[in-house]
């Protein structure tokens, strides 16, 4: 049996290279390859960096779909299905919009693949595949072994992706993670992760623990981080700001080789934070005290902000950028609010009649950075322009230089070099990302629906 695994791109402008900072290893594809029986021939193609050979013989195609890649996923599925090859789709978007995904694939996987995939492959061998495979509960991640051999010969950013845990206990209303995993988290056994890291460290990459929130359970997080200390690796991950008030944890971060954390600040407005169910961001002295603690331990920050909540005004952009510059964040993201299907945010905006599209991810008139809803205190175009100007201000040359000279951002030559490389790459991509198409702009086929 021959299986083709595809990682779809978000979109493509004909004749232009894909966005560089989006070209990281596809961990979902490696997980699927690792779950596949060894007697199945697996081929992997990454739509972001190579051309998909649609005419190459295969028996089954598997695509992990995210909301931003849904349109391109359906284009790819149509090409294979037009050639008589069945397509299986899973991933976050399949869990958020299963009925829609079922229109473009013979088989839909709803839930995590660990308990489903071996059964699905066995059914495929016997031509008895069902149209829907749904996980009844969350699986254990014990024994999970992503097959990274599928990455050989492909050029990705020098970052090794590792999963330590999956899900998050918080209930932010804009977040698809809490919707998919029902505010729960599962973690891999520490020994499994350490075994995976023991050979990955030889590649001299920064390790990115892709956990939705590595600090969702601080007791477990401390145990895990403590176990990393002997490995002497450099790593980064995503965390919630409550961890900044636990000095034992911050000390363990430094000793374990943590180079930085992505933290969702989201908004400087307390009412916005309450609206998004992130009032905990203001705990124990709020941002200022949290940042004092993080600076004391020399933790570099990737700070993310969201604009478009009900208390945001045109003045919110400049205020937020000034805050980000003052604290000299390593990097920052200034994004508009995005209503993902199935989330409390999407349902609320739909009920209020504020969605501009029912399914913005499929609209031909929608492009990356476009606003898919009506904000309360500004026009959609004003929100889009404000986000763009915020990025340009934060990634201006004076801002990059000033932040690069901060002692936290340049502890050694390795990180100083990476600071300027990363900031330079993001600066160069600001305009490239604006109005980036969802789906391949050069594709001239027709989406082929099931039935």
Image (cartoon, rainbow, N blue to C red):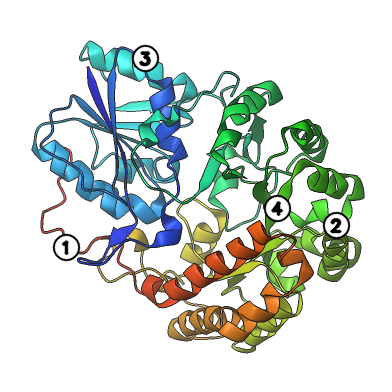
* Residue 122: % across, % down: 31, 12
Q: Is residue 327 visible?
A: yes
Circle 1 sits on which residue?
442
Q: Label 3 vs label 1: CA separation?
A: 36 Å
Please report whichever mark, 4 or 2, sits nearer to the chain's N-terminal start.
4
Please report whichever mark, 4 or 1, sits nearer to the chain's N-terminal start.
4
Residue drawn at point x = 30 percent, y = 66 percent: 437
Please tell me whether mark 1 or mark 2 is closer to you in this view: 2
Q: Nearer the viewer, residue 76 or 349?
A: 76
Q: Quadrant of residue 249?
A: top right
Q: Quadrant of the N terminus?
A: top left
Q: Quadrant of residue 307?
A: bottom right
Please report whichever mark, 1 or 2, sits nearer to the chain's N-terminal start.
2
* Residue 136: % across, % down: 51, 23
Q: Check the image and report above or below for 68 versus 367.
A: above
Furthest residue to the bottom?
A: 315
Q: Nearer the viewer, residue 425 or 105?
A: 425
Circle 3 sits on which residue?
37
**Dot 2: few (<14), some (14–19), or many (≥20) neighbours within 10 Å?**
some
Circle 2 sits on which residue?
297
* Residue 364: % across, % down: 24, 67
Please report whichever mark, 3 or 2, sits nearer to the chain's N-terminal start.
3
Disc ID at residue 259: 4
Q: Secondary structure at mark 3?
A: loop
Q: Label 4 vs label 2: CA separation?
A: 11 Å
């Amino acid at each position: 049996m021959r299986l083709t695994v595809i990682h779809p791109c978000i979109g493509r402008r004909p004749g232009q290279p894909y966005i560089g900072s989006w070209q990281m290893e596809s961990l979902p594809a490696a997980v699927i390859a690792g779950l596949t029986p060894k007697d199945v021939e697996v081929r992997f193609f990454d739509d972001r960096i190579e051309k998909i050979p649609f005419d190459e013989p295969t028996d089954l195609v598997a695509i992990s779909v995210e909301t931003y890649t849904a349109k391109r996923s359906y284009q790819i599925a149509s090409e294979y299905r037009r050639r008589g090859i069945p397509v299986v789709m899973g991933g976050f978007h399949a869990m958020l919009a299963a009925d829609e995904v079922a229109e473009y694939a013979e088989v839909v996987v709803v839930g995590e693949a660990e308990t489903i995939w071996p059964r699905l492959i066995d059914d495929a061998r016997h031509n008895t595949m069902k149209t829907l495979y749904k996980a009844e509960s969350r699986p254990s991640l014990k024994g999970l072994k992503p097959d990274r051999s599928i990455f050989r010969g492909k050029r990705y950013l020098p970052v090794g992706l590792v999963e330590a845990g999956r899900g998050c206990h918080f209930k932010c209303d804009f977040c698809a993670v809490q919707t998919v995993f029902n505010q729960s988290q599962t973690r891999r056994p520490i020994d499994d992760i350490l075994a995976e890291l023991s050979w990955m460290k030889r590649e001299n990459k920064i390790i990115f623990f892709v956990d939705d929130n590595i600090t969702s359970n601080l007791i477990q997080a401390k145990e895990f981080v403590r176990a990393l200390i002997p490995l002497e690796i450099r790593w980064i991950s995503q965390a919630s700001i409550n961890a900044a008030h636990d000095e034992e944890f911050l000390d363990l971060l430094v000793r374990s080789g943590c180079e930085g954390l992505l933290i969702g600040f989201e908004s400087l407005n307390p009412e916005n934070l309450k609206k998004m169910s992130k009032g905990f961001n203001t705990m124990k002295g709020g941002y200022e005290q949290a940042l004092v603690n993080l600076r004391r331990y020399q933790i570099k920050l990737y700070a993310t902000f969201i604009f478009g909540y009900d208390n945001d005004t045109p003045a919110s952009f400049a205020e937020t950028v000034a805050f980000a510059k003052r604290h000299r964040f390593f990097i920052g993201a200034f994004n508009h609010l995005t209503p993902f299907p199935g989330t409390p945010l999407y349902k609320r905006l739909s009920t209020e009649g504020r969605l501009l599209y029912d399914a913005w991810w499929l609209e031909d008139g929608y492009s990356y950075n476009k606003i898919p809803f009506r904000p309360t205190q500004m026009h959609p175009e004003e929100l889009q322009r404000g986000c763009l100007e915020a990025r340009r201000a934060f990634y201006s040359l004076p801002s990059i230089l000033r932040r690069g000279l901060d002692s936290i951002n340049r502890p050694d030559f390795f990180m100083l070099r990476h600071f300027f490389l990363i900031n330079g790459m993001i600066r160069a991509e600001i305009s490239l990302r604006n109005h980036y198409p969802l789906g391949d702009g050069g594709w001239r086929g027709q989406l082929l629906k099931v039935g």
